Image: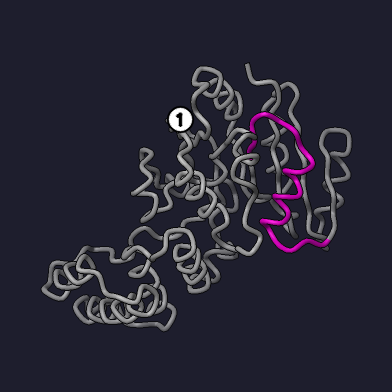
Amino acid sequence: MISTVSVVTPSLNQGRFIERTIESVLSQEIPNLEYIVCDGGSTDSTLDILRRYDHRLQWVSEKDKGQADAVNKGLRKTSGEIIGWLNSDDVYYPGAIHAVCEFFSSHPEIDVVYGDANHIDEQDNVIEPYYTETWDLERLKDVCYLCQPAVFFRRSMVERFGMLDERLHYCMDYEYWLRLGLGGVRVGHLKRVLAGSRFYAETKTLGARIKVHQEIIRMMRERLGQVPDRWIFNYAHAVLEEKGFNRKNRFRFALAVSTLSLCAAFRWNARIPRSMLRTVGRWVGGNWPNKLFVGAVRK
């Protein structure tokens, strides 16, 4: 049996959402639940909301170095056997943590569990299912198919692999999943919708897509030694979209993505792999997919 579960929520000026986040955690009715909100010094209604929950959770509000720092701060203040990390605009669905605990209890060999999730709007309505796949480390290098609020891991993972990389501001979760996978951890997929990941105009990753992809590329070079083709194509697509490149002419758009991708591959990998040349050849030859932007960052 699982003895304790710890949930950490990093927060900064999410007063319009954080109470829904808090309620989604506390309503799980899990015995011995440790729940801490690490706030970065919010100036909106967040602190008033947190004060109303003084008797039901721990919280701290002080300046930090970003989201990863806030999560790490929470990890240091908790001791639960199982750890969940829920951002202050996301929610758990009823029974999520109980299902995770049952999965871990019946699969003692598993180190990390991830479930399915939904993208939700500002009113909690489902926009679409979050894209998720069966666990495959090689595939994870191309597509971040783990939805962060639907991932839970044993505390032993922190003891073995450390905490989040505080240098990262957008892809700290993706880097952590890769770090664990490369370290040989055993991962289980719980085929149940566990969480809602908020998706709206002000979402951090939506508002800075080029910066997001640049950070992922730097992270990939450090973690893998090279940048996968897929992420280079994604970067090129994001740059052209931000510049307002006309996508109506699919051939011109494919040619522009291809050209920029080849230059980026040479810049970051110091070579252009044959796999990329084959893909570019198919695109320029007219055999391109309806969506060139594959494996995209999803909050």
Q: Is residue 70 left or right of residue 182?
A: right
In this figure, which colouring scheme has been used for the structure? one colour
Residue named by callout 1: 190
Q: Quadrant of residue 241?
A: bottom left
Q: Is residue 272 above or below residue 10?
A: below
Q: Quadrant of residue 132?
A: top left
Front one among 179 and 122: 179
Q: Could you tell me which residue is drawn at 64 percent across and 20 percent down?
A: 2
Percent position (x, y) of residue 3?
69, 21
Q: Is residue 83 above or below residue 227?
A: above
Q: Could you tell me which residue is drawn at 82 percent across and 62 percent down?
A: 63
Q: How many marks?
A: 1
Amino acid type, residue under disc 1 in the picture: Leu
Front one among 243 and 136: 136
Q: Is residue 213 left or right of residue 79?
A: left
Circle 1: is it few (<14), some (14-19), or many (20+) Cα within 10 Å?
some
Q: At numbered mark 1, what does the secondary structure look like: helix, strand or loop?
A: strand
Q: Is residue 73 above or below residue 218?
A: above
Percent position (x, y) of residue 177?
50, 47
Front one among 122 and 254: 254
Percent position (x, y) of residue 1?
62, 16
Does the magenta portion include 64? yes
Does the magenta portion include 89? no
Q: Could you tell me which residue is drawn at 45 percent across and 68 percent down?
A: 217
Q: Is residue 245 left or right of residue 289?
A: right
The magenta segment: 63-84
